[in-house]
Image: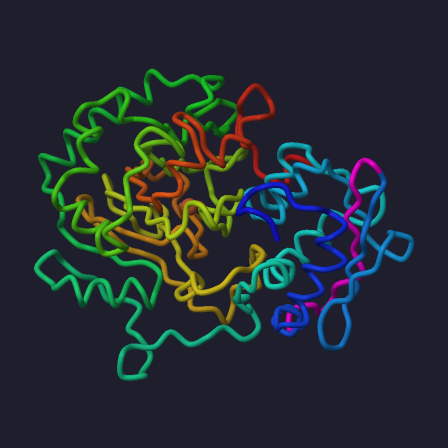
Amino acid sequence: MSERFGPIDFDRFHTVDLPERLAAGNGKLAGAHLSGLRPIAFRLVDGRAFTYIPTTDGIDIAPGDEDASTVVELAYQDWCDFVWELKSSFALLYAEGITVPRGSFGQLSRWEPALRAAFDGQVVYDFNDPPPVLDGDGNSLDLTRSFTLDDSDAEIRDFLERAGFVHLRGVFDDDEVEALGADVEAAVARARPDDQRSWWTTVDGEEVCNRVNYLNDQSTLIAGLHDDPRLRRVSDLGGSDLRAAADRLDGHGVVIKVPGASSGLADLPWHRDCGMGGHPVKCPLLNVGIQLDAATPAAGQLQMIAGSHRGTSRLPAGDEVQGLPVVALTTEAGDVTAHWGHTLHAAPPPADRHAAGRRALYVTYVSPLTFEMVGPGQGYNDVLFTRDAGRVRHVDELR
Ligand SMILES: [Fe+2]
């Protein structure tokens, strides 16, 4: 196509490169995931356009946009970034980088998995036919299993590889949790809604902080976490070349479950941590979470779709996860969770409206390429701060 992540010739891509890829197998890969999709066109601001047409055995590419049900218009650089997956459709939506003069944004987001298959051969995780999550003997993996650091790396890694997440009990003791919690509370007290380093929601009309990034800039204790031998051991489960993203991609942050949240992204819908873009750069990204409070249905839990890290997909709506292997993680303070950023996960509202907020400290380990592609202080999620004086909004609040 072009040098990786570089400029792509729009015409040659659509008349030569993409048709070759489709014919070589990507068309068949994409073809299984076109149900309900109508022809969509990408139009550059200079007027050049190509239409993607679903067929019985893949995708046809045709010049122009006259026959497209949905037309997506965008700048050339944004189109390149979209093809390279440096920006996802949702990143373009948040940044107001696209207009849809005909049809709907919903069609673009529904097309995206098939486009990833067409562009670079990614496997699609199919909500209607999810691959079974099996152990080494071919039996169903016990997804409720948890581990301790007394278990072998091989066993823990095997579970992580298959499920896409792992739960380790009793990694930090009570005194350590208390000390980390004190530094978190001090940082939350300093955070402001427009500081572009924290996320806020609304509870009973009041702004309440639900996330603070770059805590490592405020706490030497938290800054030292990524070299803690226990966390190094966990990150090595994901690959010995993974490096802590302390100075970029939001740094080490705390996610706070706030009961009664009614705006923003306090209650995270199903997502991937590479969902704003950068999947080919950051992943395999491993997010390691130190639980500062117990996670229960009442206080709110992290939910994972086991095995979903093995493919790309759009984000499932609520009822689409029925039939998928959803696992809610019940943890104690001091436990550690690790999940691939590419595993679909969610943090729905706490069942108890009056529960205390639940806090999890995250340290993110990423592929080394990240340090070439993303500068200090930058991240693919920065686009979330571009509205409402830096207040992070749920996608439904954009429309
Ligand atoms: Fe996440």
Residue 254 location in percent, x, y? 32, 34
In the figure, 386 relative to 171: above or below? above
Colour mode? rainbow
The answer to whether residue 82 is left or right of residue 139 is right
In the picture, the quarter occupied by the C terminus is: top right
Q: For the view shown, which residue lies furthest in the right direction? A: 66
Residue under the image location 71 percent in, 72 percent down = 58
> Can residue 38 be found in the magenta stretch?
yes
Residue under the image location 53 percent in, 33 percent down = 264
Judging depth in this view, the residue of 184 and 70 nearest the camera is 70
**In the image, which residues are magenta?**
32-46
Residue 197 location in percent, x, y? 42, 24
To which quarter of the image does residue 28 belong? bottom right
Residue under the image location 37 percent in, 49 percent down = 285
Residue 330 location in percent, x, y? 28, 55
Judging depth in this view, the residue of 256 and 55 nearest the camera is 55
Asked if residue 360 shows in the view, the reply is: no
To which quarter of the image does residue 342 belong? bottom left
The answer to whether residue 322 is left or right of residue 31 is left
> Can residue 363 be found in the magenta stretch?
no
Numbered label tally = 0
**Magenta segment, prevailing SS (helix, strand or loop):** loop
Judging depth in this view, the residue of 22 and 346 nearest the camera is 22
Asked if residue 224 shows in the view, the reply is: yes
In the figure, 256 relative to 323: above or below? above
In the figure, 78 relative to 16: above or below? above
Judging depth in this view, the residue of 128 and 359 nearest the camera is 128
The answer to whether residue 239 is left or right of residue 208 is left
Residue under the image location 32 percent in, 41 percent down = 364
Residue 93 location in percent, x, y? 66, 38
